[in-house]
Image (cartoon, coloured by chain):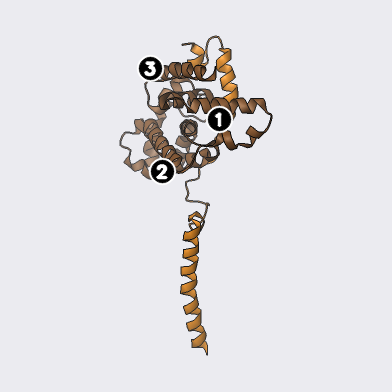
Chain colours: A brown, B orange
Amino acid sequence: MSPVDPAPTEIPRLVRDAQRGDREAFAQLYQRFARMVHGIVLARIDRTDVDDVVQDVFVTALDRLGDLREPAAFGGWLAAIARHRATDHCRKTVVTDVLTDSAASTRDADRLEAFAILSAVRSLPEAYRETLMLRLVEGMTGAEIADRTGLTAASVRVNLHRGLKLLREKLT
Amino acid sequence: MTDYLWDKSGDPDPDIQRLERALGVFAQPSPPPPFDSGLGAGPSRLATLSAPARWVGLALLAASVVPTVGALTLAVR
């Protein structure tokens, strides 16, 4: 867990404070959940658009925060907004990372490998794709993924295990 | 499942480490970029419009300005 992350028990308090208009509380929620949202969005859309959509997700969350009745459910609620916004963005654009990125025209083998693996992860079923992004790209542990997305630890374990197995098959 | 995949504990799995190294370039920077709630600086409403909508807006603006300027000119004379 990074130094900017408040303890998990602080989340409901931060959400309640943010619902009362405390912008600093919302800024702390942003710091804590930005990686999760980034991973969820990156699993679905062109990486050049990811930062804009991540900001859009948090703007939407800020607008709708008053609708959230259970502060402890903030992570799962935010993850759902991120999935929805990314899917909506995806309908309007085409994912072209691998085809158009300038790195693809270079001889940089590491970058090409990275794009090939990213493409393989994106081709996995949604649940596996998202969980592997959070683990392998964002560097979150299984417990952190469960804590922030609202998934059970058992589901995260299954997603990691099956997702990695499928990814290895695609990369061989 | 290896502990390394779950929480990076135990013996490192070289294959997972290779995936982490390769994919890590796409990670969210730490700390993340500042949050822009849209209440501060940002693109103007005009800038967010599509090109045709922008031209229609400018045409309507011109159509409202020209008669006003004409009327003022006549009034001054």
* Residue A154, quarter of picture: top left
Q: Residues within 10 Å of mark 2 (few under 14, many from 20)?
A: some
Q: Which residue is mark 2?
A: A60
Q: Distance from label 2 to label 3 (Cα)? A: 30 Å
Q: Which residue is mark 3?
A: A154
Spot the residue most to the bottom: B77
Q: Position of residue A95 (x, y in %)?
A: 51, 37
Residue drawn at x 44%, y 38% is A86
Residues at circles 3 and 1 in contact by the CB criterion of under 8 Å:
no
Residue B10, can we see it?
yes
Q: Which mark is residue B27?
A: 1
Q: Position of residue A73 (x, y in %)?
A: 35, 31
Q: Secondary structure at mark 1?
A: loop
* Residue A80, quarter of picture: top left
Is disc 3 on the same chain as disc 2? yes
Is disc 1 on the same chain as disc 3? no
Q: Amino acid at mark 1?
A: Ala
Q: Distance from label 2 to label 1 (Cα)? A: 22 Å
